[in-house]
């Protein structure tokens, strides 16, 4: 059995927490299931399966994301990558298994509390309001943190006044961090695709999440845009110390950007390890690396 396969198996059997009950301190789900034993993982999937009719999107997936790491999730089309993010964010309820967030284990991810738990995401096909400005789209990333009432907001008094000021400051900071100042008041729909992807990263990161789930943030970009975006993802991680889950097809960028790589095929995690380990894994070569992805052909 390969080292990678052994790592995967050693994580199997992680503590099956009760819904909403804290995972035991030191349990595998909370103490690093990634083989190094040193880092804790506040975000994990335990034995997650999900199917649509006869299609198994995820099959018995165990995966822990070490705090502060960048984990790339790779695999061919239909491998279950987006489904994995959708399970973490409660869009889909798994048929079996649990999502662990900050020591609590859920049979269904608590959608309404995700923002306060520090979970943010981007979408494979962009989740922006094209008729709103760049500023407004990014500011929406802070809306879940608002505590003022509608009356306070309408009158511009009390907590609302402070929140408006905070929103403006945080949004302007995000615009600066992602070099988007010149697009501040432009309608998003009129901007180049690569810029829109960057705006989405800004929206997802403006509330300073602990967990940032990025579904193909580099897809469809020019190589220059990809290199730039890669630097932005790195800077978000170092600025926020966030745990990043990155779905990406460009294997070169995956290898340079990620600390860990999890490889999926037909809903199953077929390998997990460092970029170098995964690149050398025969099952991965057979399933993925040896054949060009549809995006890379021609
Ligand atoms: N809402 C849904 N209804 C029915 N089938 C679905 C649904 N969502 C996903 N699937 C199926 O589940 C499987 C996994 O899909 P998923 O979108 O997670 O793959 P992916 O790895 O993100 O693929 P891609 O690289 O094309 O984005 C596919 O067979 C897909 O058709
Ligand atoms: Mg997808």
Image (cartoon, grey):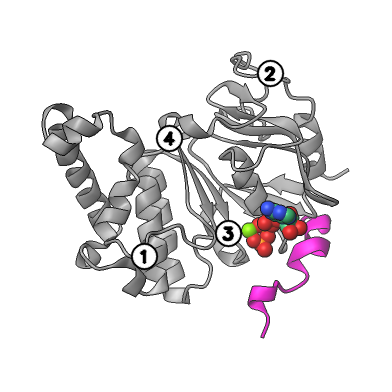
**Sooner in the amino-acid sequence: mark 1 or mark 2:** 2
Residue shown at 45% from the left, 57% from the top: 127
Q: Residue at x 47, y 29 (%)?
A: 113
Percent coordinates x, y for residue 20 in the rendering: 60, 18
Q: Give the range drawn in magenta.
A: 275-298
Residue underneath mark 4 = 115
Which disc number belongs to residue 158? none
Counting residues from the start of the chain, the first of labels 2 and 3 encountered is 2
Which labelled disc corresponds to residue 130?
1
Q: Is residue 43 above or below residue 69?
A: above
Examine the residues drawn in magenta and state their main secondary structure.
Answer: helix
Identified at 59% across, 15% down, the residue is 22
Q: Look at the image and tell me whether residue 279 can be seen.
A: no
* Mark 1 or 2, closer to the camera: 1
Q: Label 3: which residue?
A: 254
**Label 3 element class:** helix
């Amino acid at each position: 059995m390969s080292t990678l396969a052994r790592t995967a198996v050693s994580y199997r059997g992680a503590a099956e927490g009760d819904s909403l009950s804290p995972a035991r301190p030191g349990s595998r789900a909370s103490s690093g299931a990634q083989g190094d034993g040193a880092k804790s993982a506040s975000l994990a999937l335990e034995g997650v399966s999900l199917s649509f009719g006869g299609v198994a999107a995820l099959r018995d997936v165990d995966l822990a994301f070490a705090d502060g790491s960048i984990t790339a999730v790779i695999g061919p089309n239909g491998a279950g990558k987006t489904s994995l993010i959708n399970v973490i964010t409660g869009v889909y309820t798994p048929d079996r298994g649990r999502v662990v967030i900050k020591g609590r284990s859920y049979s269904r991810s608590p959608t309404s509390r995700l923002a306060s738990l520090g979970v943010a995401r981007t979408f494979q096909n962009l989740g922006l309001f094209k008729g709103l400005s760049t500023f407004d789209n990014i500011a929406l990333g802070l809306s879940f943190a608002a505590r003022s009432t509608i009356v306070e907001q309408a009158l511009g008094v009390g907590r609302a006044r402070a929140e408006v000021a905070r929103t403006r400051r945080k949004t302007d900071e995000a615009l600066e961090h992602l070099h988007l100042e010149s697009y501040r008041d432009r309608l998003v729909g009129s901007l180049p695709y690569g810029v829109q992807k960057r705006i989405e990263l800004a929206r997802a990161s403006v509330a300073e999440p602990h967990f940032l789930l990025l579904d193909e943030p580099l897809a469809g970009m020019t190589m220059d845009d990809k290199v730039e975006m890669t630097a932005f993802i790195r800077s978000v991680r170092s600025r926020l110390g966030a745990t990043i889950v990155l779905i990406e097809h460009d294997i070169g960028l995956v290898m340079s950007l990620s600390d860990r790589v999890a490889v999926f095929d037909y809903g199953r995690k077929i390998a997990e390890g460092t970029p170098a380990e995964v690149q050398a894994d025969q099952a991965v070569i057979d399933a993925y690396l040896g054949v060009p992805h549809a995006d890379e052909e021609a």
